[in-house]
Image: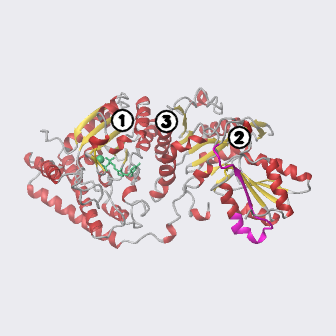
């Protein structure tokens, strides 16, 4: 039962298992078949399912996104592979104006059961157009569900749930984690949407962290341990729907919170979660809720600069210490 | 009108009725706007009836269509009922989309209408995807993508035509060239020829008089049958004309289109009048019978309008329903 596999393998298994179960599922995207994507996540699938179900497309993101929407409306369950999260900007009309709104605009008569798999994450030295974490863009649009797996275990369980969902789901994998291993059971499991995971229990401060930032938060908690500060780490796993209950319950207990996410901090996920905490746990708070997202700059190429743009365990720990000591002041 | 053999009187009558139904629907929709009884704006299909009817009469009920902002004609032609359509236009609960879509998003999946679309060209991927789905699942359904001349300027079309041609998808791209996109003549926005664009992908392209329902239908019958056999995709350019402005509020339009031009199309090339004359000349219908059909349909439309005006709005609790399938109320979910 207990074995460790990479996030990449977990994604591959989730797709293969679901495709074996349901013949209406197909996968579509660029270089997904023999190449198995540039990240090799899908290797082997075309050999098992054939080119009719693992469909290589021309480099036409809006086009194949649109095809997926129409196929989803007519009895298929497409999985769209969008090579880089940055290419979301190309598919916005089909995703946000078409897929997201069809169920609503049709008064519930048409469903769009599709999964858009893509990725996020900087520090791969890929510069501004291959490094963005754009989940806030889609989380803003009613009608889209958004999942952010933080390990191989989550990647598999959330993707299987996404594939079975009758709605458009966007799932972002952290492209730096494709080779990271985690324990993943052999037997089938699903992870329900809207159920956060308490990744580490603590008393003094809540770190709400998504995707790539869960590792950062766990490392932060280790650092804080040495200072005698006990941090609780919460991984929402999906941001639409968001498990507010678990987050609020944690903050009521700890009375402090930092929200960490790799999307840009301004107008982003961190602001949304922080404000929900402030609205719903205000009288339990002993310090302002802090946001820590990516710096509000395009992602720079130079390693010397890129590393400055993403929250680090040291930076989060520093803010946590200030928060716990009551030294966190608003810069007026 | 090309001489045709009297092969199928029932089909001819149905085509005539469907065109008259579209015209009657639009006349009433226009009146609803002018008398301030309709929320928002709407785009009239009048003048283009032979396109929707000629093509949809060549389709099976389970075949799919995608429609446009000027979509009432496609909706009627694919089998929709007046009552639910007027209810939708007025935002009523009994509308096809429970009042959530309105004129520009009317969809009737029970007859394969995957919906109008307020994004010009926005449904080109959807129609092509429906064809991909049909091919993969082996349903034998054909998808028809209706769009205007203006939509040919959208890049999406070229992306999806490329894939449709590569994968031989059962989709027919039907471009209703009514000479204008909003307030701009097609000549000013379209370089070269539209059929040549499709042909560049190896797609068989046809151009047809969109005011001649028999010509449209004959071509559509052939192409639909061939698409069903896996010989698609196809492209059809249909020369047609919209009688009203771009939308119902576009009334003073001398600055972009002459009244003579409008009068010319309406008097000489009206698809309903001309088809009626042909039915008479062929001895299929008498003038009186045609009048009777028109009267009956007008009365139907009027009754449906009355019904829709009196119908209830959706209760406020529906505002956050249908955001997600399987979730009753989105606000308590997100
Ligand atoms: C992407 C997009 N751009 C612009 C518009 C505004 N708009 C609505 S209809 C229209 C003209 C469309 O012309 P055409 O495709 O020829 O259709 P027609 O109105 O003639 O039926 C425009 C520009 C829109 N709805 N969507
Ligand atoms: Mg036009």
Q: Residue at x 29, y 54 (%)?
A: B246
The label shown at residue B228 is 1
Q: Is A289 inside the magenta-drawn segment?
A: yes
The label shown at residue B293 is none
Residue annotated with mark 3: A60
- The location of residue A322, given as percent across then percent down, is 83, 59
Q: Quadrant of the C terminus of chain A?
A: bottom right
Q: Are marks 3 and 1 on the same chain?
A: no
| B188 over A42 or under it: above or below | below
Marks 3 and 1 sit apart, C-alpha to C-alpha, by: 26 Å
Q: Circle 1 — which element?
A: helix
- The location of residue B161, given as percent across then percent down, is 40, 35
Q: How is the protein colored in the picture?
A: secondary structure
Residue annotated with mark 2: A306
Marks 2 and 1 sit apart, C-alpha to C-alpha, by: 54 Å
Q: Residue at x 89, y 53 (%)?
A: A225
On the question of residue B276 being in view, the answer is yes
Q: Are marks 3 and 2 on the same chain?
A: yes
Using the image as rendered, state which of residue A131 and residue B34 is in the foreground: A131
Q: Which residues are magenta?
A: A276-298
């Amino acid at each position: 039962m207990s074995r460790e596999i990479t996030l990449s393998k977990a994604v591959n298994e989730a797709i293969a298992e679901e495709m074996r179960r349901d013949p209406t599922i197909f996968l579509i995207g660029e270089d997904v078949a023999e190449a198995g994507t540039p990240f090799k996540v899908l290797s082997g699938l075309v050999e098992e399912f054939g080119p009719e179900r693992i469909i290589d497309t021309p480099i036409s993101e809006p086009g194949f996104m649109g095809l997926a929407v129409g196929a989803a409306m007519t009895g298929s369950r497409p999985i769209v592979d969008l090579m880089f999260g940055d290419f979301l900007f190309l598919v916005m009309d089909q995703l946000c104006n078409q897929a997201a709104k069809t169920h609503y605009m049709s008064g519930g008569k048409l469903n769009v059961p599709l999964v858009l798999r893509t990725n996020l994450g900087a520090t791969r030295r890929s510069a501004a157009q291959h490094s963005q974490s754009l989940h806030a863009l889609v989380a803003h649009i009613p009608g889209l569900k958004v999942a952010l797996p933080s390990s191989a275990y989550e990647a598999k369980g959330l993707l299987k749930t996404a594939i079975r969902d009758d709605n458009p789901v966007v799932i972002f994998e952290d492209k730096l984690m494709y080779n990271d291993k985690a324990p993943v059971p052999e037997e089938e499991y699903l992870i329900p949407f809207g159920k956060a995971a308490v990744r580490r229990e603590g008393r003094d401060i809540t770190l709400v962290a998504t995707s790539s930032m869960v590792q950062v938060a766990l490392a932060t908690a280790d650092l804080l341990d040495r200072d005698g500060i006990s941090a609780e780490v919460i991984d929402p796993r999906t941001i639409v729907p968001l498990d507010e209950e678990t987050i609020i319950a944690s903050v009521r207990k700890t009375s402090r919170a930092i929200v960490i996410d790799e999307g840009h901090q301004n107008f982003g996920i961190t602001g949304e979660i922080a404000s929900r905490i402030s609205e719903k746990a205000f009288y339990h708070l002993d310090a302002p809720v802090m946001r820590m997202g990516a710096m509000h700059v395009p992602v720079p190429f130079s390693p010397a600069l890129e590393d400055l743009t993403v929250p680090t365990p040291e930076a989060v720990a520093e803010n946590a210490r200030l928060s716990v000591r009551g030294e966190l002041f608003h810069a007026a | 009108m090309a001489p045709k053999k009297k092969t199928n009187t029932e089909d001819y009558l149905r085509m005539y009725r469907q065109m008259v139904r579209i015209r009657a629907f639009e006349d009433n929709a226009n009146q609803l706007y002018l008398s301030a009884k309709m929320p928002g704006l709407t785009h009239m299909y009048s003048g283009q009836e032979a396109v929707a009817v000629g093509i949809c009469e060549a389709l099976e009920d389970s075949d799919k269509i995608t429609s446009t902002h000027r979509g009432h004609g496609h909706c009627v032609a694919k089998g929709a009922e007046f009552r639910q359509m007027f209810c939708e236009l007025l935002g009523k609960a009994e509308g096809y989309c429970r009042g959530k879509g309105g004129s520009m998003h009317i969809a009737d999946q029970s007859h394969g209408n995957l919906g109008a679309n307020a994004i010009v060209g926005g449904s080109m991927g959807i129609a092509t995807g429906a064809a991909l789905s049909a091919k993969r699942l082996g349903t034998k359904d054909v998808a028809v993508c209706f769009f205007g001349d203006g939509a040919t300027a959208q890049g999406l079309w070229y992306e999806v035509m490329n894939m449709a041609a590569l994968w031989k998808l059962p989709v027919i791209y039907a471009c209703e060239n009514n000479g204008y996109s909003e307030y701009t003549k097609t000549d000013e926005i379209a370089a070269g020829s539209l059929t040549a664009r499709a042909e560049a992908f190896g797609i068989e392209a046809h151009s047809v008089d969109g005011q001649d329902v028999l010509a449209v239908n004959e071509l559509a019958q052939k192409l639909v049958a061939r698409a069903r056999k896996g010989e698609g995709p196809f492209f059809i350019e249909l020369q047609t004309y919209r009688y009203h402005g771009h939308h119902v509020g576009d009334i003073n339009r001398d600055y972009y289109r002459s009244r003579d031009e409008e009068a010319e199309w309406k008097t000489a090339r009206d698809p309903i009048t001309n088809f009626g004359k042909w039915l008479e000349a062929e001895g299929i219908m008498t003038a009186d019978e045609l009048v009777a059909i028109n009267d009956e349909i007008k009365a139907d439309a009027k009754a449906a309008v009355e019904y829709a005006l009196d119908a209830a709005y959706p209760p406020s609790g529906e505002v956050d329903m249908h955001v997600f399938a399987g979730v009753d109320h989105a606000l308590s979910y997100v």
